[in-house]
Amino acid sequence: MITRRALLAGGLGLATFAATGESPVRAAARRVPLTDPFQLGVASGEPTHDGVVLWTRLATDPLAPDGLGGMPDRRVPVQWQLARDENFRHVVRRGVQEARPGAAHSVHVELDGLDPGAEYFYRFRADREISPVGRTRTTPAPGTRGTPLNLSFASCADYQSGWFTAYRRMAEDQPDLIAFLGDYVYEYGDYRHPVRDQAGGECLDLAGYRLRHAQHKADPDTRLAHAVAPWVVVWDDHDVENAWAGEVPEQPDASFLDRRAAAFRAYYENMPLRRAQRPDGAALRMYRSIRWGAVANLHLLDTRQYRDVYACTGKSGTVGPDCQERFAPNRTILGREQETWLDERLRRSRATWDLLGQQVFLMEMDWINGEGKGYSNEGWDGYVASRDRLTAAIEGHGRNAVVLTGDVHSHWAGEVKRDYRDPGSASVAVELVTTSVTSAGDGLDEYPNTGTLLAENPHVRFFNGRRGYVRARLTQQEMSVDFRSVSRVSEPGAPAYTSGSFVIEPGSPVLNLA
Ligand SMILES: [Fe+2]
């Protein structure tokens, strides 16, 4: 039998691209040959059991101040190939897509009809230039048991704060899937003493956000991490502006929704997202789910776009003065629509694990050392009724939920309780908080107040204050977790080590020491 794969399988290497003989490509190549247009690397994302998104963005000069990557103001045909092997002997799909100036010459190729649970390799060609090769994979077929999920997750990659060594170490593990939980870029202006110089100053408009993304994508550690595995991404505040809440910016700004729209547009252009995540002005539907056979559903949540403004002060503060508003029953951090969607997803889930990929601390956390209590109004502590509805949904639908969190620039692990006022309260879920890739600099394993913080929050069981990422392996029998730390980000090339390891078993939402 002649398979479609055999029919589509082309010749070797470059000859395969040339053989397609697309006349627009030849015409473009004659007109203005591009020099080194793949400096932003390649990426893939949003895997399903039969598809994935392939991404690249052409830039011959990533740090061009207008954010357009030095590209000419014309459409460029980009050829792409998908193969079963990294030498492209068995090409199973190919095509051409235009990179348009209006999309900052980004390309999103949305594939379906692929084999489930399969590894693929992909690359692009523009003019005579060939991109680096990326590795990606589809998820197991629906209901598939026994295929483990090797998942790594990370957050908070501030360019000025250091080297993206955590990305490189994460890539070396060759996970099946990488989840990024927010603050992929920082909108900040220039620091006085940065570890690395950023281009462009504070991001305020489309050119600024495009440039910031381009600088991040051109980083060799970032390029490696995107090339080894498909990513699923959600944003946090700095992908737009520090501490934004819905339509409310941190600083009064009548044109904030224009800024938000610019940030959303650049975010979409620079990420391997589906058309379903294409922004409509200042709106972008970010919440969605990824399935991994019968082992796990990963629900990606957006705690920024629909949240009510900050309780008690109207402004975010790490620890604000406390007040009753935190407990107001109508307050929401997800927005009603997303809450309903998530409840429905949990109700219908049949997977062993339901992972909630989101941004801010879900567990209650008293951040004041010793006397008195202080809660962040930016995390779920500022939206207690929203949290209660979520924990009720997890319990009510009988799910094994594990919450994956970013934002706070240190590793934490703990247990989400039904009622924090009751010391004997049942655990409802486990929360794993990943540290930053770079934000806050080198850090320390422990701080002088670490012991007290852990003692005063007995449901919180682990802390590490270095930079890094979290590596997890999920089967239907257990979820094992390694908190990975890098010894420094002020210089490139630091080693990574495991600062804490835990095992979670289905039916028992507690952390067990590995
Ligand atoms: Fe951050």
Image (spheres, rainbow, N blue to C red):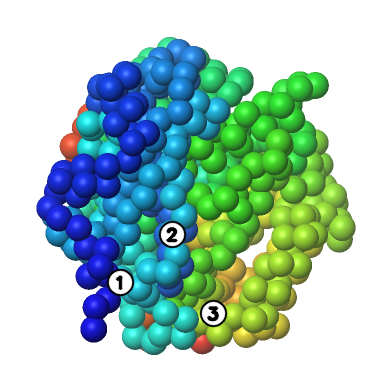
Of 323 and 156, nearer the camera is 156
Q: Residue 142: x and y, percent?
A: 47, 81
Whichever of callouts 3 and 1 sits on the residue coming sooner in the sequence is 1
- Please, what secondary structure does the residue beneath circle 1 have? helix
Left or right of 319, for residue 311? right
Q: Amino acid at mark 3?
A: Asn
- Mark 2 or 3, closer to the camera: 2
Circle 2 residue: 111
Q: Amino acid at mark 2?
A: Leu
Q: Residue at horizontal 29%, vertical 31%? A: 26
Circle 1 residue: 4
Q: Residue at horizontal 85%, vertical 52%? A: 324
Circle 3 residue: 400
Q: In the image, is residue 322 above or below residue 127? A: below
> Residue 127, located in which quarter of the rendered image?
top left
Q: Residue 312: x and y, percent?
A: 81, 42
Left or right of 414, for residue 279? right
